[in-house]
Image (cartoon, helix red, strand yellow):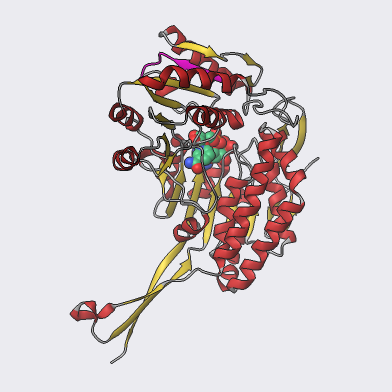
Amino acid sequence: MDHKLFIDGQWVDGGPLIEVTNKYTGAVIGAVPSARREEVDAALGAANRAARVMADLPAHRRSEILARASARIRERGEELAKTIASEAGKALKYARIEVDRGATTFQIASEEARRLHGETLALDGVPAGEGYFGFYVRRPVGLIAAISPFNFPLNLVAHKVAPALAAGNSLVLKPATSTPLTAVLLCEILEEAGLPPGALNLVVGSGATVGEWMVSDARVAKITFTGSPPVGRRITQLAGIKKITLELGNTSPVIIAPDADLAYASKRCAVGAYYNSGQVCISVQRIYSQRPVYEPFTEAFVQASQAMVVGDPLDERVDVGPMIDVKEAERIEGWVQEAQAGGAQVLTGGRRERGVYWPTVLTDVRPEMKVVAQEAFAPVASVIACDDFEEALRQADETEFGLQVGVFTRDVNRVLQAIRRLNFGGIIINDTPAFRTDAMPYGGNRQSGLGREGVRFAMEDMTNIQLVAIRTG
Ligand code: NAP
């Protein structure tokens, strides 16, 4: 089925069609026109005009639109889940969870829209402020350029669109070129929900053209980007003076202390390493296990890895579907072979068929190997033996990234030590770094990004503080 771009409340044609495939079978499942410069310009112009309309829309109206969108996401849930499973290759059971989370993200935004407020200020706390009454309000920034990755085609788009609208902004959205169909459905849903024309515009096309035109445009007040670190760096070079949120990569570590519940930890690590074929920014990649529990943990983790059902993502029983394309599966196959050549052991997996890569456990890896040092973004995890907790903390933290980290321990002193020592945006105790709920602050330190998502926190980043000082004397 051929789709259209969504600009100024109209469904419009553009340049040559981009075919979208089922990532397991390779069959074409739809096509979307690529946006040319004129469509991108029209979208930015429409959003710029709608920014004023959105800023003036009362909070209760914004809230109602978002609540209706949340309800429609649930009503169209199965259609959305099947679209995600087909275009992204995500197992249907996880695609359904993503849909549920997408509806929740809009629901949270509907609630937060009613509580966007500032505070009063004690300006007379310094002599120069005597005789002044002060407060600040949060004003929408205006036009937001949103660029999203392929791995959560609904919920990562929702984490940009819902808080932006809740805070009274307008957007131009560019989804990943490989997964635009879910974004088309989301635009239909927001149109059905009564969003004013131009408040959300959809353009599709390559990052190097459409993405760069968007981020370098002077009308854009803020960029919100989720994707790879090199593209994040490129955006900071092009942006000029704009607010920027960057949600980038990680080489997510997990620490297994000797007092951990090994049966639970091994099962959670397997889910955290392999769901969406490990193509999750907080996917479990480096597991530091202390020596007393290294062998039993590794054995249980291998068993849990082998229990994963691999195959067609539209099959309800399947846990692990294909990677986003065959090239990506070939890339990780190469990384694992390189690690093996350097002395790593493959305890299970290491197998590829077209775009599918089997859940893979490595041991005897070294810190400089790609599978450890770089973001694997694939269903591959390494278990690394550590002499003590201090050493596990040191190795887990020895990375340029800093998104989330998991620590399995029941010892409160270890928990407190981990909080002090680990420079990550999120520290997850007794679960893996893959834990995320949609209202919590979420984002990375160091090269993992700038700013935070999680609806309320994204809204803070999507508003400007406006001070009001009133001389009363
Ligand atoms: P990607 O290649 O960086 O692409 C992300 C988006 O950026 C796509 O829409 C892409 O368009 C666009 N883009 C590419 N080049 C661009 C440019 N020069 N200027 C502007 N936009 C450009 O990332 P991906 O492969 O889709 O996703 C995987 C990465 O995302 C991983 O590194 C992962 O860790 C990260 N991620 C982070 C989070 C988080 O919350 N921290 C969540 C999910 C994923 P095209 O599709 O046309 O290339």
Q: Measured along the vertical axis of the image, is residue 215 above or below residue 248?
A: below
Corner quadrant of residue 44? bottom right
Q: Which is nearer the eye, 190 or 206?
A: 190
Taking the magenta stretch, the answer to whether it contains residue 366 is yes
Q: Tell me if residue 41 can be seen.
A: no
| Residue 346 spot, x, y in % from top left | 50, 12
Q: Residue furthest left?
A: 127
Q: Which is nearer the eye, 344 or 10?
A: 344
Q: Tell me if residue 389 can be seen.
A: yes
Q: Residue at x 40, y 9 (%)?
A: 342
Q: Is residue 124 shown left or right of residue 249?
A: left
Q: Which is nearer the eye, 51 or 352?
A: 352
Q: Residue furthest right?
A: 1
Numbered disc total: 0
Q: Quadrant of the C terminus?
A: bottom left
| Residue 258 spot, x, y in % from top left | 38, 27
Q: Residue at x 41, y 8 (%)?
A: 343
Q: Which is nearer the eye, 309 or 312?
A: 309
Query: Start and end of the magenta stretch?
Result: 360-367
Q: Measured along the vertical axis of the image, is residue 172 above or below residue 250?
A: below
| Residue 312 spot, x, y in % from top left | 73, 26
Q: Is residue 305 shown left or right of residue 389?
A: right
| Residue 451 spot, x, y in % from top left | 42, 50
Q: Measured along the vertical axis of the image, is residue 263 above or below residue 135?
A: above
